[in-house]
Amino acid sequence: MAEENPLLMLDVDGVISLFGFAPQAPPAGRFLLVEGIAHFLSATSGEHLRRLSATFDPVWCTGWEEKANDELPVALGLPGPYPYLSFDRAPGAGAGSGQSVRGHWKLAAIDAYAGARPLAWVDDAHDASCAEWAHARARDGAPTLLVATDPAVGLTDEHVTKLTRWAAELSPEFPLR
């Protein structure tokens, strides 16, 4: 029986939509106006996400929630919309594996969605509670990888390599690309 691909939880701001770079030396990319707000999209993020989609099941894990599918699949050349998480903006109690999830405002939604499924979470704003959650029994022993990005650089080739190698270590069935 084939295993499910691991989940890939994707933040947008600081991963795909870059900020904090020197205006006189911006990275490769372009601006996209979303609901009147300019977002600077990394020139390589579409290619990176297409590569990762061969190994992972991507999920938008961003404050953009469903809005990520309004703009990003077309702007990045993705094959279609990704599932997305909706967040309770009050961090604290969460569902999931029957335990309380405390800390980062995204943890309860991630825990409830992923259950015991292996996952990698790419974000520019992990905190200590994220690391604690990723390595705690709250994940029911499910493999979890946190990948931190620099918001001025976003998702890189090195991140993609780290993610695909991690997935390949989980199971030889996951394609290494």
Image: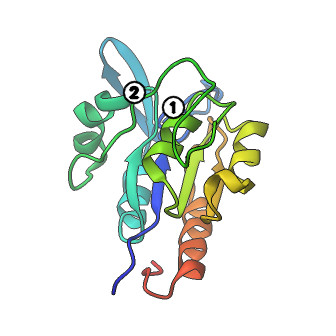
Residue depicted at 47% across the width and 56% down the height = 8
Residue depicted at 64% across the width and 59% down the height = 145
Disc 2 is placed on an element classified as loop
Q: Amino acid at mark 2?
A: Trp
- Residue 81 left/right relative to 153: left
Q: Which residue is mark 2?
A: 64
**Position above or below: 166 against 176:** above
92 and 82: which is toward the camera: 92
Between disc 2 and disc 1, whose residue precedes? Answer: 1
- Residue 78 left/right relative to 7: left
Q: Is residue 11 visible?
A: no
Q: Amino acid at mark 1?
A: Asp
Which mark is drawn over residue 63? none
Q: How is the image coloured?
A: rainbow
- Residue 155 left/right relative to 85: right
Q: Pinpoint residue 164: horizontal percent, then vertical percent.
A: 53, 72
Q: Pinpoint residue 51: horizontal percent, then vertical percent.
A: 40, 66
- Residue 61 left/right relative to 92: left
**Position above or below: 127 against 37:** below
Q: Residues within 10 Å of mark 1 (few under 14, many from 20)?
A: many
Q: Pinpoint residue 148: horizontal percent, then vertical percent.
A: 67, 47
Quarter holding the N terminus is bottom left
Q: Are marks 2 and 1 in contact (CB under 8 Å)?
A: yes
Q: Which residue is mark 1?
A: 13
Residue that sits furthest to the front in the current view:
98
Label tally: 2
Residue depicted at 53% across the width and 59% down the height = 119
Disc 1 is placed on an element classified as loop
Q: Pinpoint residue 130: horizontal percent, then vertical percent.
A: 70, 42
Quarter holding the C terminus is bottom left
